[in-house]
Every structure is written in C-alpha cells, then in structure tokens.
Image: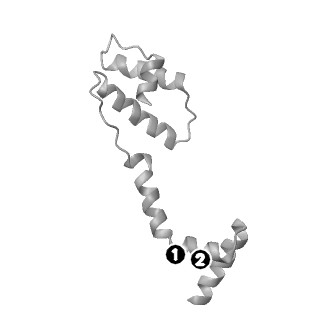
Amino acid sequence: MKKHLSQRKKILQLQFGIGKTTVSDILKRSGEYKTIYEDNTTSARKRHDTGSKYGELNDLVFQWFKQARAKNIPLSGPIIQEKALELAETLDLTDFKASNGWLESWR
C-alpha cells in the first residue's frame, strides 16, 4: 500500500511540476478541499428573492443560466437579456424590460 501511494505521489509531482511535500500536503487536505468545492458549486448556491416583482422570472433565468453553463455555452449580457425577454413573454410579463439595470441586479 505504501509503495502504491509513493508511486502516486511521484506521478503527481511529475504531472504538475510540484514538490513531494506539496503533493503530500494536498493529499492530506483533499477531504477539506472537496468540501470547500462542493459548498461553492453553483448547484449548491441559493439565489435569494429580493422581493422583486420579477422573482419568478429571475429564478427561471438562473435555472437556464446554470444549464447553459453546464453545457459550456458562452453567455454574455445581451444573450441573458434576450433569454429573459423570451421567458417574460411566456409568463405574460408585458411590462418587463430586460434593461442593463435589470441585468446588473440579476447578476
């Protein structure tokens, strides 16, 4: 078992160009790093409704945003605004304007 771990450390050293001590430290703290990563993934984040009359729309845009990012689709402000307008239409929000102010607030 110890020989296998030593080989694994050597491979990691060579692969990432780091020292033996650094590899050991990272492996010792791997559980901690995994927990931090899982706590910070977008699926774990909660969006808070700010009481906006467009709260449902904001949530739908965010769900779409997460799906697009998961598929590595590049997104920009205008693309998000266009999708928000489409979703607003399906929700019959006739007074909604996907303004730059809305976009900044949504972000």
Q: Looking at the rendering, in which quadrant would you find the C terminus?
A: top left
Q: Is residue 98 above or below residue 107?
A: above
Quadrant of residue 1 within the rendered picture: bottom right
Residue 35 in picture, x, y percent from top left: 42, 62
How dense is the environment of label 2, judged by Cα within 10 Å: few (below 14), some, or many (20 and up)?
A: some
Residue 88 in picture, x, y percent from top left: 36, 19
User: Which residue lies under the disc numbered 2?
Assistant: 24
User: Which residue lies under the disc numbered 1?
Assistant: 28
Residue at 55% over, 31% down:
75
From this viewpoint, which residue is outermost toward the bottom? 2
Residue at 43% over, 57% down:
38
Q: Disc 2 residue type?
A: Ser
Q: Are marks 1 and 2 in contact (CB under 8 Å)?
A: yes
Of residue 77 and residue 84, the one placed in the foreground of this image is 77
From this viewpoint, which residue is outermost toward the top? 95
Report, in whole angstroms, how far the alpha carbon at label 1 lies from the one at label 2.
Answer: 6 Å
Q: Disc 1 residue type?
A: Lys
